[in-house]
Image: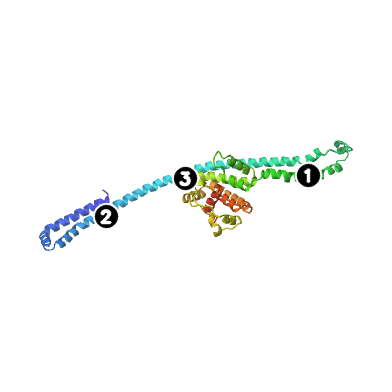
């Protein structure tokens, strides 16, 4: 028994003593009241019993309130412990995501350095090609005696045609092959942004490889791959998202730079759990936030280049890809479409 129960018991004993004294002192009057007015007698007895009943009802209510407060405190402690464990696990995942992102960035930097070295090697080898193909005239003496006699006039003559040959080699063939690779059509671009469906999707892997070989598509494809991998850590998969993509005309308007209510339909994701998890990840995980903003910028640039020459069906297919749904989800979380 707590303090409230002890106090109620003492008050009940005092009240019982008062009722006993009243019955002993006024017993005859109560009997006459019972014979003369039974309803009045019942009301009198109710008045004697009701205070004790109300007192114990109040005690029971106080005990229930105390139990609820204790249960609330236990639940609050359990929630705090779960939140602390979740934050610790999130920190560990963020550390792993940072290492994976750093490895990916190192790989991209190494590829860019190798490509730059190849371009520089071809540019250095370009001026030597005319000298090897066109032999000197038969009447011209060997080069070493001419250098000994006078190097100035002789060296100036063969140096003139080089500027005409070098730009064609460096800016024409090499830049087109090294920077863009094989042409990537509209259908292949959309297929690359949807990624292979499974390990048996040979055509999907081939299109993805060709997209990664091009500088203009490798950036958006790599950024989309990073974002989809990070979202999958929270159980957010693009194939499970509910909602229909916005009409192609809305996507065209967004590609043309329109913002505000005119493109609000692009926020078409209706999965509240995915929106909540992605929003929490954006606020708490700096690695995910940087990757998401990088993907949004890359996809926005790719959409601006893709939309002018694409048909409405192509834009609808792009919006239905996994990358398109990720763009709609993250754009809705970051309020890009508002």
Q: Is residue 23 visible?
A: yes
Relative to 56, is 167 on the left or the right? right
Give the quarter of the image for residue 202.
top right
Which structural element holds mark 1?
helix
Which badge, 2 or 1, is on the more N-terminal residue? 2
Q: In the rendered image, which residue does mark 3 sit on?
A: 87
Distance between mark 1 and mark 3 Cα atoms = 62 Å
Residue at 71% x, 43% y: name it. 174
Crowdedness near tag 3: few (<14), some (14–19) or many (≥20) residues, C-alpha within 10 Å: few
Residue placed most toward the observer, 199 or 28:
199
Q: Nearer the viewer, mark 2 or mark 1?
A: 1
Relative to 69, is 338 on the left or the right? right
Residue placed most toward the observer, 251 or 285:
251
Which structural element holds mark 3?
helix
Residue at 75% x, 39% y: name it. 125
Distance between mark 2 and mark 1 Cα atoms = 102 Å
Residue at 74% x, 42% y: name it. 123
Q: Residue 77 at x, y = what percent?
A: 39, 46
Relative to 213, is 18 on the left or the right? left
Distance between mark 2 and mark 3 Cα atoms = 43 Å
Residue at the limit of the structure toward the right, as seen here: 139
Determine contact: label 2, label 3, CB under 8 Å: no
Crowdedness near tag 2: few (<14), some (14–19) or many (≥20) residues, C-alpha within 10 Å: some
Q: In the rendered image, which residue does mark 2 sit on?
A: 58
Q: Is residue 219 visible?
A: no
Determine contact: label 2, label 1, CB under 8 Å: no
Relative to 300, is 233 on the left or the right? left
Identify the mark at residue 84; answer none if there is no mark.
none
Residue at the limit of the structure toward the bottom, as seen here: 36
Q: In the rendered image, which residue does mark 1 sit on?
A: 165
């Amino acid at each position: 028994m707590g303090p409230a129960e002890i106090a109620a018991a003492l008050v009940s004993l005092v009240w019982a003593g008062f009722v006993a004294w009243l019955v002993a002192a006024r017993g005859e009057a109560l009997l006459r009241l019972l014979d003369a007015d039974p309803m009045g007698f019942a009301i009198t007895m109710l008045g004697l019993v009701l205070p004790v009943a109300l007192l114990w009802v109040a005690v029971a209510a106080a005990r229930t309130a105390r139990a609820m407060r204790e249960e609330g405190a236990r639940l609050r402690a359990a929630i705090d412990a779960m939140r602390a464990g979740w934050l610790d696990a999130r920190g560990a995942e963020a550390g792993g995501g940072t290492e994976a992102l750093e490895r990916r960035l190192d790989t991209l930097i190494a590829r860019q350095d190798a490509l730059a070295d190849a371009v520089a090697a071809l540019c250095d080898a370009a001026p030597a090609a005319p000298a090897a193909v066109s032999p000197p005239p038969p009447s011209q003496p060997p080069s070493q005696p001419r250098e000994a006699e006078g190097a100035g006039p002789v060296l100036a003559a063969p140096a003139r045609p080089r500027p005409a040959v070098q730009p064609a080699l460096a800016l024409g063939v090499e830049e087109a092959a090294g920077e863009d690779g094989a042409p990537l059509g509209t259908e292949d671009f959309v297929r690359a942004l949807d990624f292979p469906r499974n390990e048996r999707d040979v055509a999907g892997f081939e299109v993805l490889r060709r997209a990664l070989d091009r500088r203009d598509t490798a950036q958006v494809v790599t950024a989309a791959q990073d974002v989809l991998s990070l979202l999958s850590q929270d159980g957010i998969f693009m194939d499970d998202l509910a909602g229909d993509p916005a009409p192609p005309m809305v996507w065209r308007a967004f590609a043309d730079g329109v913002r505000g209510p005119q493109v609000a339909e692009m926020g078409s994701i209706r999965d509240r759990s995915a929106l909540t998890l992605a929003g929490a990840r954006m606020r708490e995980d700096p690695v995910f936030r940087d990757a998401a903003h990088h993907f949004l910028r890359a996809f926005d640039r790719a959409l601006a280049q893709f939309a002018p020459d694409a048909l409405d069906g192509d834009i609808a297919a792009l919006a239905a890809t996994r990358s398109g749904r990720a763009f709609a989800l993250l754009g809705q979380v970051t309020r890009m479409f508002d």
